[in-house]
Amino acid sequence: MKQAKTIAIIGGGVSGLSAAYYAQLSFPGSRIVLLESALRLGGVLQTDHVDGFTIERSADMFVTDPPHAFDVCQRLGRDQQLIQTTPTKDRAFVATDDSIHPVPSGLSLMLPNDLDSVLESPLLDEAAKQLFREERNVAARSSDDDESLESFAVRRYGQSVFEQLVQPLVSGIYTADPKKLSMNATMKRFVDMEQKHGSLIRAAEESKSSSHEKQASGARYGLFRAPENGMEQLVNWLADSLTQTEIKLSSQVDQIRKVDSGWEIEILNLNGKRAESGETVVADGVVIATSARIAGKFLDNVDAKLAKELQTIQAASSAIVVMGVDCDQLSKQFDGYGIIVPAVLGRKVIATSFSSNKFAGRAPEGKLLIRTFIGGALQPELVELTDDELVEIAMEELDATVGFSGQPELSRVYRWRNCMPQYHLGHVERVESIDAMSNQHLGLQLAGNSYRGVGIPACIQSGLEAIERLGKEISDQ
Ligand SMILES: Cc1cc2nc3c(=O)[nH]c(=O)nc-3n(C[C@H](O)[C@H](O)[C@H](O)COP(=O)(O)OP(=O)(O)OC[C@H]3O[C@@H](n4cnc5c(N)ncnc54)[C@H](O)[C@@H]3O)c2cc1C
């Protein structure tokens, strides 16, 4: 058993919660303190229950591969309370100027597991299809320097395939500017496929005939899971397990300092003034599980170079308009999970997600719960529109895609400012350099969505790995 220590975790989102959970397991008998500036735990994960609708304010699911989110649910004995997507509606659509068409079956972002379905799709014109076919003859890139999504996709498939298929499929995940989004940080598997097989089409073909190469075939809906009552349950499950952790809400960390005995963490109250108690926590080890930008602020006095590097990791903002509508308000039944909108169409919506088609129990019988994503790196100014303006945009988009009349019986707008980290060109090297610098500071660890993945499993993994590294660093002191 390790010697008792004090471990402080800053940030009570899913990354910090998982760090606290694994700290309890790794440092039994130690003092574990979780510091969260908000009045509640969970960070961006929040679920509202209104008039029979289950509304996700941000994430609405996690994937089971990578396995870290599912693993933690299993460890907590909650995996039986996870639900899967509704299989009969497991299709996504892409908008065109005057219609919507299904994403070609088997297309996994850029990997065509079913070439015919791409070549038959009305989403691409004949010229685009011809370029698509010729991808197998496009020489692999010789440089291993990082490349942007746009450069990679245009190089392999041509401009119109990028604009009509790849950009919308990817922007739904990262709300990113494809000119800046790093392939190495976000879609390295495609870079590796190009190097190994010379072409993505060939990679898809060869993986079909090879039983041992694991490939996702099309969208991975079978891997989607959500707690039956919404994502906030995951937060509650983790929080309930933290019986050995002092959870301090409304505790905004202002600064951290290195002291002889480890780390001194200065906390402010919610008003931004110094806490009357003048509370500071002194810890042997600290995990900063906030965004990199905020971590950079804390560390300015500890290591200005590290702080500066952390603050180069930007984040995009977005707004989600949630609407509860009657099924009869749509001109026709829509049997899909959502509709993504290519940026090239010049519309104001990134995607519309039909939450109640995706997961059962999200809307009362005869009603639909619809979430419209607006803003992101390409249209940040839209996030600052008024709620009414944003709801109007969402209704117009719904009308343009599936036909909508009347007013929603429920509408809500949630804004997420600077919450989606942007893995820009060079991100992998940036994170390696951050690691090298933070490794110089014994007992300091970083976790969260700014570094090695924005999805919930990656966040949970970041908490786990931060605690593992901390264990190696401070347990023998
Ligand atoms: C709109 C949206 C939709 C998404 N959809 C999905 C999805 O469907 N599936 C999926 O897997 N992922 C999704 N994600 C990504 C995923 O939800 C996030 O990456 C993840 O929840 C981030 O967790 P985190 O703990 O790293 O950060 P956060 O949730 O941002 O938590 C950080 C915490 O730190 C606290 N904090 C900040 N400053 C201080 C301070 N000074 N002192 C103390 N505490 C502080 C904050 O209050 C917050 O609670 C989505 C994200 C967004 C924004």
Image (cartoon, rainbow, N blue to C red):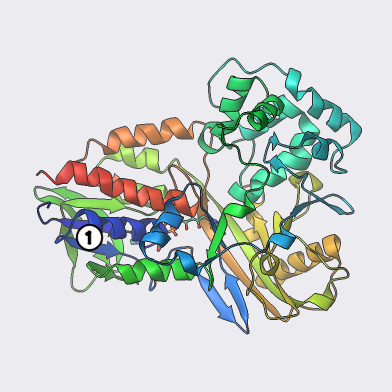
Q: How many marks?
A: 1
Residue 160 left/right relative to 68: right
- Image quadrant of residue 52? bottom right
Q: Residue 237 at what x, y percent from top left?
A: 39, 69
Residue 301 visible somewhere in the drawing = no
Give above or below for 370 relative to 445.
Answer: below
Tell me if the residue at label 1 has its CB under 8 Å from ligand 1.
Answer: no
Residue at the spot 60% in from the left edge and 31% down from the top edge: 148
Residue at the spot 54% in from the left edge and 71% down from the top edge: 228
Residue 256 left/right relative to 151: left
Residue at the spot 21% in from the left edge and 40% down from the top edge: 441
Residue 405 left/right relative to 284: right
Identified by mark 1, the residue type is Glu
| Residue on which disc 1 sits | 266
Residue 225 visible somewhere in the drawing = yes
- Image quadrant of residue 353? bottom right
Q: Residue 133 versus residue 395: which sits nearer the camera? A: 133
Residue at the outermost bottom position: 51
Residue at the spot 65% in from the left edge and 55% down from the top edge: 375
Q: Residue 36 at what x, y percent from top left?
A: 33, 65
Q: Residue 106 versus residue 278: which sits nearer the camera? A: 106
Q: Residue 175 versus residue 277: which sits nearer the camera? A: 175
Q: Residue 243 versus residue 299: which sits nearer the camera? A: 243
Circle 1 — which element?
A: strand
Q: Residue 105 at what x, y percent from top left?
A: 76, 45
Give above or below for 48 relative to 383.
Answer: below
Q: Residue 345 at what x, y percent from top left?
A: 81, 47
The quadrant of the picture occupied by the C terminus is top left
Residue 398 left/right relative to 99: left
Q: How many neighbours does mark 1 have within 10 angstroms: few (below 14), some (14-19), or many (20 or more)?
A: many
